[in-house]
Amino acid sequence: FIKAKNYPDSTSVETENDGSESAIFRQLFQKWTLPNQTSGLGKTHTVGKVAKVEQVKFDATTLHAKPQMAAQQKMVDDGSGEVEVWRVENNELVPVEKKWLGHFYGGDCYLVLYTYFVGPKVNRIIYIWQGRQASTDELAASAYQAVALDQKYNNEPVQI
């Protein structure tokens, strides 16, 4: 894949599977929850109940205080980039509303475009998330739409 796209050999590629998403991928979404995730003293997350989120002051500049940790975790930036998410529906991309960001359903496929800056240069990563129960048509459509999105940006984004 890297050679076919003429990416440098140093380009890292990561696959995200339904139910085993990496922490780096999940950090792109504010309200990501895991099945049977507990909060507090054993309270389990269930669909239909929204957990109260406490606002905590956070200084993003402290992320740069530990560049070794950022490198170990393969973080591309401090999380200040822009996230766009689409669900594949009838072979087309349908934007996901902001209130539903981080909600992925096992019978669907999604594309996530993360745009960030390194100095003045714009960089993009396209994540392809394919649900475990997604149909063969949806799986194929998500791959096709990822290529189309990649071509929209002159084949510059890295696809994961």
Image (spheres, rainbow, N blue to C red):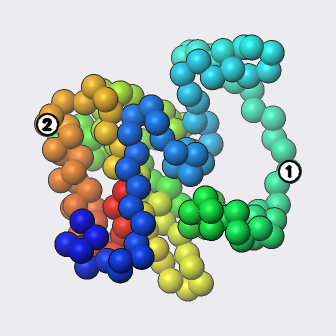
Q: Earlier in the sequence, mark 1 or mark 2?
A: 1
48 left or right, relative to 139: right
Of 2 and 37, which appears nearest the observer? 2
- Callout 1: SS: loop
Label 1: few (<14), some (14–19) or many (≥20) C-alpha neighbours in 10 Å: few
Return the mark for residue 57.
Answer: 1
State the image coordinates of residue 14 (x, y, percent, origin top left). 41, 55
Q: Which picture quadrant has residue 38?
A: top right
- Callout 2: SS: helix
- The residue wearing badge 2 is 137
| Count of numbered marks | 2
Q: Residue furthest right?
A: 57
State the image coordinates of residue 134 (x, y, percent, origin top left). 25, 30
Vertically, is 15 above or below 152? above
State the image coordinates of residue 15 (x, y, percent, origin top left). 37, 50
Vertically, is 145 above or below 52? below
Residue drawn at (27%, 41%) of the image: 88
Foreground mark, 1 or 2, reads 2
Q: Are marks 1 and 2 in contact (CB under 8 Å)?
A: no
The residue type indicated by label 1 comes to Lys
Label 2: few (<14), some (14–19) or many (≥20) C-alpha neighbours in 10 Å: few
The residue type indicated by label 2 comes to Asp
Residue drawn at (22%, 61%) of the image: 147
Residue drawn at (66%, 15%) of the image: 44
Q: State the CA–CA distance, disc 1 to disc 2.
A: 44 Å
155 left or right, relative to 43: left
Answer whether residue 92 is visible to the viewer in this image.
Answer: no
Answer whether residue 39 is visible to the viewer in this image.
Answer: yes
Quarter containing the C terminus: bottom left
Q: Residue furthest bottom?
A: 120
Quarter containing the N terminus: bottom left
